[in-house]
């Protein structure tokens, strides 16, 4: 299978267009037309992971973190990034990174973490604004079902826990075919009246290109009429963090012990316990303390994330318990989560999780 086709499956849910400005997601090295029969998944790219791929004869690695963040002016093997790049190119290994483009999706890092902890009624903690468009097109009646099916299958029409959402109204379209045209209906030089359906639906911006391509391919008209409107609605399917409920209330210390054991953490750090039962839980894989006020506003009892600084442990102000489980520990759920997604959407393609521990933090 071409790596390009695997990437298309990945980006149907986690487009690089979703990445943060500082990030570097997507295909970092390798030829997208290269054939691959298996991918190796890892949280971080290291020389050990590259060696593992070489030993297993795997030519495609998918990582959570990109190994190239800043610009590279020289490639002479003086640091690990350069050595990884050299060895990957020499061995025809393609490397793709997801990071913040995957962090903000369902079933991305935070959603997967919440699910792994057994939360229910999971939703995005901080949905993104200005990410939705409304697509409207005008279709002859007998082609309406084909066109609707095409654009909804391409990713349009997803609202909350519902998909294939659309609306239609019937009307009459008019046009006159001029010289050089090849009209689907009507005659050149004559004004034609055609019964049509106005089909409208909602589209995430990062899927808009794919949806438009599906529309143009399925629509019978030579010139397809469609409109795109910006929306101010929050996209509840895209954003950082996740929040959900426990199946039953749990004492604070019991819940923290459960989290430590469930995520196999060497240790966890937490703010002052409030002697309250835990019912609603907010999480954010990686460095997510910027979402603290969002968690408080949505009345979470505890907020689980990583990379919390000393003075930030004072910020909860007895409103919530914050828990630092470690950066790697909060994001290693990426491995089974992405493997499940790829296995579900790809056939005749193997997915293997790296056996290398790429956590740079060690514990005594």
Image (cartoon, helix red, strand yellow):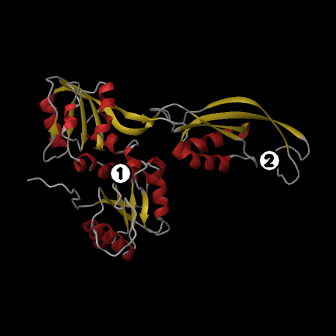
Circle 1 residues within 10 Å: few <14, some 14–19, many ≥20: many
Name the residue that disc number 2 marks. 184
Residue in front for this viewpoint, 327 or 7: 327
Outermost residue toward the right?
A: 189
Rendering coords of residue 191 (x, y %): 88, 39
Residue at screen point 25% across, 33% down: 303
287 left or right of 7? left
Circle 2 residues within 10 Å: few <14, some 14–19, many ≥20: few
Residue at screen point 29% across, 27% down: 296
Name the residue that disc number 1 marks. 338
362 left or right of 145? left
Rendering coords of residue 126 (x, y %): 39, 34
Q: Secondary structure at mark 1?
A: helix
Q: Is residue 132 above or below residue 286?
A: above
Q: Secondary structure at mark 2?
A: loop
Residue in front for this viewpoint, 98 or 181: 98
Q: Which mark lies nearer to you, 1 or 2?
A: 1
Residue at screen point 55% across, 44% down: 153
Q: Earlier in the sequence, mark 1 or mark 2?
A: 2
147 left or right of 340? right
Residue 79, located in which quarter of the rendered image? bottom left
Q: CA distance from mark 1 to mark 2?
A: 44 Å
Rendering coords of residue 83 (x, y %): 31, 72
Outermost residue toward the left?
A: 364
């Amino acid at each position: 299978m071409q790596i390009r086709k695997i990437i298309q499956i990945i980006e149907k849910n986690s487009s690089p267009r979703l990445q943060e400005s500082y990030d570097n997601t997507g295909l970092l090295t390798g030829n997208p037309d290269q054939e691959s029969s298996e991918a190796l998944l890892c949280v971080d790219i290291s020389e050990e992971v590259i060696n593992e791929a070489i030993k297993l004869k795997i030519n495609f690695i998918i990582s959570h973190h990109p190994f190239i963040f800043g610009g590279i002016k020289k490639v002479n093997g003086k640091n690990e990034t350069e050595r990884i790049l050299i060895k990957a190119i020499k061995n025809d290994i393609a490397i793709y990174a997801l990071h913040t483009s995957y962090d903000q999706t369902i079933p991305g890092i935070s959603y997967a973490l919440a699910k792994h902890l057994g939360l229910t009624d999971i939703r995005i903690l901080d949905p993104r604004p200005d990410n939705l468009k409304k697509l409207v097109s005008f279709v002859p009646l007998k082609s309406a079902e084909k066109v609707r099916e095409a654009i909804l299958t391409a990713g349009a029409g997803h609202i909350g826990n519902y998909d294939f959402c659309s609306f239609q109204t019937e009307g009459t379209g008019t046009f006159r075919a001029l010289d050089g045209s090849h009209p689907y209906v009507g005659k050149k030089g004559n004004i034609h009246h055609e019964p049509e359906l106005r089909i409208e639906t909602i589209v995430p911006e990062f899927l808009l290109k794919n949806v438009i391509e599906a529309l143009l391919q399925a629509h019978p008209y030579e010139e397809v009429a469609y409109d795109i409107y910006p929306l101010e609605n929050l996209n509840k399917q895209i954003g950082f963090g996740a929040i959900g409920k426990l199946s039953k209330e749990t004492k604070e210390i019991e819940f923290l012990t459960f989290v430590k054991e469930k995520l196999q953490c060497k240790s966890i750090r937490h703010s002052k316990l409030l002697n309250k039962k835990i019912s609603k839980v907010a999480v954010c894989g990686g460095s997510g303390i910027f979402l603290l006020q969002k968690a408080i506003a949505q009345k979470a009892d505890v907020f689980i994330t990583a990379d919390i600084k000393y003075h930030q442990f004072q910020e909860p102000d007895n409103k919530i318990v914050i828990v630092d489980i470690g950066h790697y520990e909060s994001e290693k759920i990426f491995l089974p989560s992405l493997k499940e997604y790829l296995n579900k959407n790809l056939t005749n393609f193997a997915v293997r999780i790296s056996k290398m521990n790429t956590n740079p933090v060690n514990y005594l």
